[in-house]
Image (cartoon, grey):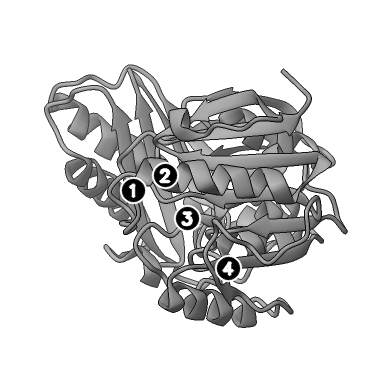
Amino acid sequence: MQSVFAVTARGLEAVSLREMRVIPGIQNAQTAYRRVLAECDSLLPLLSLRTVDDVFLQVAIWPQIDHTRSALGNIQDWSAEFDLPKAAGIISKIRPIAQIPSFSVTANFVGKRNYSSEEIKSSVAAGIQEQWTWNYLEDDRESDFNIRVFIEHQTALVGLRLGKRPLHERSYKQVQRPGSLKPSVAATMLILADLKPGEHLLDPCCGVGTIIIEGAVMGAVVQGGDVDSEAVEAANANAASANIQTRFEQWDARNLSLLDGSVDCVVSNLPWGRQIQIDADLKAFYRDICTEIERVIRPDGRVVLLTTMPDLLNFKRLRLVEQIEISLFGQNPIISVFKIGEI
């Protein structure tokens, strides 16, 4: 059995735990701040996780990390004790590894400290290079491995990334725009919508198409559009990259050319905060789009919406059943889940 941990956005830990527990051979899965820890007998299925940002083979736990600068020396010493060849050998079973690998370091911490993330990275790199011939690269995109150091209070969890790239960096996402949703968050919203293969999924404010593409991967019949012609063009480019057979439309989300009660799920990242500007008055926009969503949703349909202004989401028949605050774009938007006839 191998110890692993997946990193996710704050607020999404429980959904990522739910996804991870479905994988055969997963044991002792549990959540912590921004991560899910588990043991498993096979690493390869973990690379198929959709709701996490990344997943790592655990290589160390460092206790009693002090907030003073003296901790940097300890971090360097501990890093020299990594058995990196052994860890690389484990990961080489799921992807090719160079004979002399290169590595990058990512460091995060919770709470105030008298040193920076950059200084943690430098200490880890120095310790590794004392012991091994691995090449340190600052650019994660160029390295064979990423070493992740996650410090919470006085304990550090250290891991080696399973994949060469973060899981949330989907290869299909060739075009980005301001406010574009992370694929891992989009996948989480679809799980919260209880989306099933063959159901009709609608995203009326599709942006670059992330929700729709993730839904198509899950087997849904998908349809999406946006008022912004450049967003529609980007969405179509990303869908083509993902080999998804759908065409996004330019439309006004408040006046959709869809039949009443024709959609199983509506999942959307609505315009909010500083990410997107719209011309219409925001309150009026939300009022009208809620009316249109309620018109097209089926009697047993589900609606999942992301916004920093959930108080503007008002429906007549749909009832709020769950809300989750997450961390995204430096803000704290809320995922709201609605169903018809449920409280």
Q: Is residue 82 left or right of residue 263?
A: left
Q: Nearer the viewer, mark 4 or mark 1?
A: 1
Residue type at mark 3: give it.
Answer: Leu
Which residue in the protein does label 2 denote?
284
In contact (CB < 8 Å): disc 1 and disc 2: yes
- Decide which of 132, 87 is in the foreground and name it: 87
Q: Which mark is residue 225?
A: 4
Q: Position of residue 159 (x, y in %)?
A: 48, 43
Residue type at mark 4: give it.
Answer: Gly
Residue type at mark 2: give it.
Answer: Ala
In contact (CB < 8 Å): disc 2 and disc 4: no
Residue 3 falls in which quadrant of the image?
A: top right
Q: Is residue 148 left or right of residue 287?
A: left
Q: Is residue 113 left or right of residue 4?
A: left
Q: Earlier in the sequence, mark 3 or mark 2?
A: 3
| Quadrant (top left, top right, bottom left, bottom right) of the N terminus | top right
What is the distance, in whole Å, between disc 3 and disc 4 at their CAs? Answer: 15 Å
